[in-house]
Amino acid sequence: MLDYARVAGNSEFGKLVESRARDYYLKDRACPLAYEPSGEDFLSPCLAEADAMRRVLPQAEFAAWFAAFLPRVIWSQRAWRTSPTASCITWRV
């Protein structure tokens, strides 16, 4: 929906989608990765939520949210060396 709103230039709808994503997901912490994959999921619900928030939040805010949302994801020293934002920039590409 957000992609559509942005491509179509429908900023009112885009703002609504961004607002709802923040309302639904901004306070989420420690996504339960132990439940994935469930055998019924084609996509990871945790990563789908993270991707939606990546599109909504500014990079620095996303980096902080992502670190709390998936705290058990182990980042290599090399990937995390500069800052969480640097890793998010790589993920956004």
Image (tube, grey):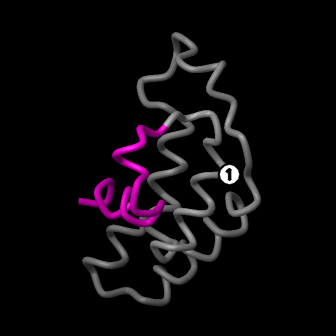
- Left/right of residue 31 with respect to residue 27 in the rendered view: left
Q: Main secondary structure of the magenta part?
A: helix
Q: Is residue 51 magenta?
A: no
| Image spot of residue 42 (x, y percent) | 42, 24
| Image spot of residue 38 (x, y percent) | 57, 14
Q: Residue at x 62, y 60 (%)?
A: 65
| Image spot of residue 15 (x, y percent) | 53, 83
Q: Mark 1 falls on what kind of element?
A: helix
Q: Nearer the viewer, residue 53 or 6?
A: 53
- Left/right of residue 75 with respect to residue 73 in the rendered view: left
| Image spot of residue 83 (x, y percent) | 45, 63
Q: Is residue 84 magenta?
A: yes
- The residue lying furthest to the top in this view is 39
Asked if 58 appears above or below 67 in the picture, the reply is below
Quarter of the image where one finds residue 21: bottom right
Q: Residue at x 48, y 44 (%)?
A: 48
| Type of the residue with mark 1 | Ala
Q: Nearer the viewer, residue 90 or 31?
A: 90
Q: Residue at x 53, y 17 (%)?
A: 37
Q: Which residues are magenta?
A: 75-93
> Circle 1: is it few (<14), some (14-19), or many (20+) Cα within 10 Å?
some
Point out the image quarter for the C terminus: bottom left
- Left/right of residue 5 with respect to residue 75 in the rendered view: left
Point out the image quarter for the N terminus: bottom left
Q: Residue at x 41, y 38 (%)?
A: 76
Residue topped by disc 1: 68
